[in-house]
Image (spheres, grey):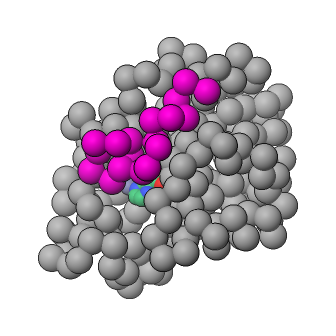
């Protein structure tokens, strides 16, 4: 059984959004058109409470600076994907009708979650692993935003959890802060993620 996992195709990550990823909207129609080839479609949605600890504004620090948190280093982002705001909604062109499951992440005030599987402490589960196992899903294709953060973290966790994982890099776009894209691609290759 094969699932397509569509990571964070939300207004704030698309042009005009608060943490816009260049070309983020270009991938939407092609993502819609591959949905028919999968047994299950899972969407993730970055979904932060106001004043989330991953926001630079919550600490009066510079955007894109790095802060040491109890669980490790955290990039401080512009405010984005605040629960219930239009920026947190899926892009209107994304086909959400086909979704079997929507996983929301980053919902705890004190901890971020890039991965669809575990929060940034790498321990707290989102529940996606159990869901996929319960449905007998063994093969995952990941697409979406952003390649170097939520897509890469999800792919690395999925590989660690022994799924067969591929990332369709043509259907992803990156933030690319400080070489983050190159290091994410290297780590995914080392983890035997199939980059297509
Ligand atoms: C993401 C930074 C902060 C992502 C989410 O979807 O890649 N990046 N929150
Ligand atoms: Zn976020």
**Residue 114 versus residue 171: which sits nearer the camera?**
171
Count of numbered badges drawn on the protein: 0
Q: Position of residue 112 (x, y in %)?
A: 40, 62
The secondary structure that most of the magenta stretch takes on is: loop
Q: Examine the image and state in which quarter residue 32 appears.
A: top right
**Residue 139 versus residue 186: which sits nearer the camera?**
186
Range shown magenta = 13-30
Q: Examine the image and state in which quarter residue 101 appears.
A: top right
Asked whether 18 falls inside the magenta stretch, the response is yes
**Residue 98 versus residue 137: which sits nearer the camera?**
98
Quarter of the image where the N terminus is located:
top right
Residue 113 vertical placement versus 130 (above, below)? below
**Residue lying at 73% horizontally and 70% vertically, measured from the top left:** 186
Residue 119 vertical placement versus 103 (above, below)? below
Q: Position of residue 62 (x, y in %)?
A: 23, 77
Q: Position of residue 91 (x, y in %)?
A: 39, 30
In the picture provided, is 6 more to the left or to the right than 196? left
Can see residue 40? yes
In the picture provided, is 68 more to the left or to the right than 144? left
Q: Position of residue 55 (x, y in %)?
A: 26, 65
Can see residue 107? no
Instruction: State the residue lying farthest toward the bottom.
Output: 68
**Residue lying at 45% horizontally and 35% vertically, measured from the top left:** 25
Q: Examine the image and state in which quarter residue 45 appears.
A: top left
* Quadrant of the displayed image that contains ligand 1: bottom left
**Residue lying at 55% horizontally and 35% vertically, measured from the top left:** 27
């Amino acid at each position: 059984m094969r699932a397509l996992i569509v990571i964070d195709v939300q207004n704030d990550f698309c042009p005009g959004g608060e943490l816009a990823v260049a070309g983020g909207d270009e991938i939407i129609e092609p993502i819609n058109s591959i949905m028919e080839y999968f047994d299950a479609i899972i969407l993730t949605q970055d979904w932060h409470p106001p004043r989330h600890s991953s926001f630079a504004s919550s600490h009066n620090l510079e955007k894109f600076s790095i802060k040491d948190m109890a669980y490790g280093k955290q990039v401080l982002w512009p405010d984005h994907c605040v629960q219930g705001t239009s920026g947190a909604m899926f892009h209107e062109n994304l086909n959400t009708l086909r979704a079997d499951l929507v996983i929301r992440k980053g919902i705890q005030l004190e901890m971020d979650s890039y991965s669809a599987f575990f929060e940034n402490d790498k321990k707290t589960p989102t529940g996606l692993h159990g869901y996929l196992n319960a449905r007998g899903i063994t093969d995952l294709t990941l697409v979406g935003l952003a390649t170097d953060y939520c897509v890469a973290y999800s792919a690395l966790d999925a590989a660690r959890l022994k799924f067969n994982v591929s990332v369709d890099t043509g259907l992803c776009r990156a933030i690319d802060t400080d070489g983050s894209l190159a290091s994410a691609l290297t780590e995914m290759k080392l983890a035997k993620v199939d980059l297509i």
